[in-house]
Amino acid sequence: MTHEIQNRKGATKLENIPEQVLKLLNEGTIESVNLTEWLAVNHTALVATVFPKIGISNANISEIQELIENQKKPSTMNTIKLIGAFLYEKYAKSTDYLAIFEKLATHLSDSVRCYATYFMALNTDFSLEKKLGLLQPLVADKHFGVREVVWMALRPELSENLAFSIDFLSVWAENEDENIRRFSSEALRPRGVWCSHIETLKNSPELALPILEKLKSDSAKYVQDSVGNWLNDASKSRPDFVQELCKRWEKESPTKSTQYIVKKALRTLSK
């Protein structure tokens, strides 16, 4: 692999991705470095190259390729979920389930690691706590795509078990890893992005205070953005809560971090 490929910044347009980079992405031998590359991956080609080495049968590979090609509304997110769900259906009861998960979750390709999130999140035999533990390395993944997909994969079950989720994530809100702290906020955003709303938190955002309070002056901008967006979500249904909380935080925590979060939280109400 050339130095140029290893240290590339990534093309901003699909047609500008070098042919060699696209080939390596589709072989699963390099990671994508930006959203353009992440969206450009040919998952039909990727599973054909990677899955035999993971232990997926040729019959299952052919079936999953057919499903990918026949999607009515193809998108990268839909394809990732489709592949993770298919693998879970085929291997949920297999003695190789955890071994396959480990191979997916530790693969060099960020796209393959994304498959692992749904492969585990859809598991109905494991408790939510166990799944969170097994997926924690992907919550902390260095790749932006994996981090986004893992919270979307877990969000339905997290929202269905709010009391447990808030209690659990309030501990993660104190983790030394900013990616894990960010997950504790992002996964339960009342409105979220590309996902269903959480009606309980839209109407009663105060339930999430055990998480939010621990992040009100977080040093990481990545976390600050998430907390500000969380509160901006809440401001659309509970402006009273957000305004009062921001006033209190400004008094209790007169830091630049808190000021940034408050400004982001109030941006819709300030219009």
Image (cartoon, rainbow, N blue to C red):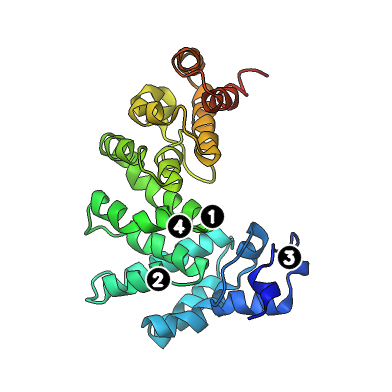
Q: Secondary structure at mark 3?
A: helix
CA gap, disc 1 to disc 2?
A: 17 Å
For marks 2 and 4, the one nearer the N-term is 2
Q: Quadrant of residue 103?
A: bottom left
In-image side of 230 versus 60 (left or right)? right
Q: Quadrant of the C terminus?
A: top right
Q: Find disc 2 in the rendering and name its residue.
A: 104
Q: Is residue 92 above or below residue 255?
A: below
Task: Identify the amino acid type marked 4.
Answer: Asp
Measure the C-alpha gap from mark 4 to mark 3.
Answer: 25 Å
For disc 4, the marked residue is 141
Residue at 48% over, 72% down: 108
- The amino acid pointed to by label 1 is Phe
Name the outermost residue toward the right: 16
Choose the circle earlier in sequence order: 3 or 2.
3
Q: Residue at x 47, y 41 (%)?
A: 196
Q: State the separation of the CA atoms marked 3 and 1.
A: 18 Å
Q: Residues within 10 Å of mark 4 (few under 14, many from 20)?
A: many
Q: Nearer the viewer, mark 1 or mark 2?
A: 1
Q: Is residue 216 above or below residue 33?
A: above
Q: Position of residue 239 (x, y in %)?
A: 51, 17
| Label drawn at residue 119 | none
Are the residues tagged 1 and 2 within 8 Å (C-beta)?
no
Task: Let me know if residue 16 appears in the view.
Answer: yes
